[in-house]
Image: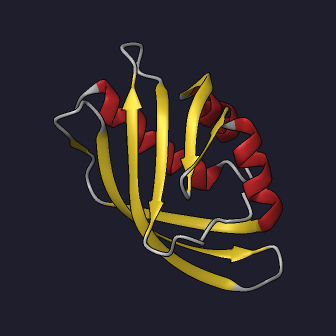
Amino acid sequence: MTTAVHTLNDYFRLFDASRTDEQAMEQLLNLFIPDVEIVLNGSSRKGFKNFIDMFYQYNIDIKHMHEPWELQNNGTYESRWAVCGMSSEGTVYAKTGIDIARVNEEGQIVYLENVQENQDAFSKY
């Protein structure tokens, strides 16, 4: 397994654990460069911490499942995923999509794009 794939697998694992585990949150944040480009629903922003903090304001639990990350011709990695969760309002949900990521030579994520089958799925973030 390459360093990039290991980092990206850790991303999904730590994302789920970070809600209740401070060490997991710290490890998750360390997977990203500070000014990582995050693209959600076509909107780009910088930094992962603001996103994850806002995400957990609206969600009280989450679990990801994902297919193996595949290296693309342009140097990015892609993985299909499914997620189930519970919103802070107490409703449950399930979503599917693809993550597209780029990892630098140091093994940190420099770009992460979340492409959902339902384009309005994470419109709050």
Q: Residue at x 48, y 54 (%)?
A: 114
Picture coordinates of residue 49, whole percent (x, y): 72, 37
Q: Which residue is drawn at 35% across and 34% down?
A: 6
Image quarter where the C terminus lies is: bottom right
Picture coordinates of residue 118, whole percent (x, y): 50, 75
User: Which quadrant of the figure has residue 58?
Assistant: bottom right
Tag count in the figure?
Answer: 0
Q: Residue furthest front?
A: 42
- Depicted 56 relative to depicted 104: above or below: below
User: Which quadrant of the figure has residue 7?
Assistant: top left
- Depicted 115 relative to depicted 86: above or below: above
Picture coordinates of residue 65, whole percent (x, y): 41, 64
- Depicted 32 relative to depicted 91: above or below: above
Image quarter where the N terminus lies is: top left
Q: Which residue is drawn at 56% across and 58% down?
A: 41
Picture coordinates of residue 66, whole percent (x, y): 36, 60
Q: Which residue lies furthest to the bottom in this view?
A: 91
Instruction: Using residue 119 as the reference point, say whether residue 86 is left or right of it.
Output: right
Instruction: Using residue 16 as the reference point, say whether residue 90 is left or right of it.
Output: right
Q: Which colour scheme is used?
A: secondary structure
Instruction: Using residue 63 as the reference point, say whether residue 97 is left or right of it.
Output: left
Instruction: Using residue 5 as the reference point, say whether residue 50 is left or right of it.
Output: right
Q: Which residue lies furthest to the top in this view?
A: 106
- Depicted 124 relative to depicted 25: above or below: below
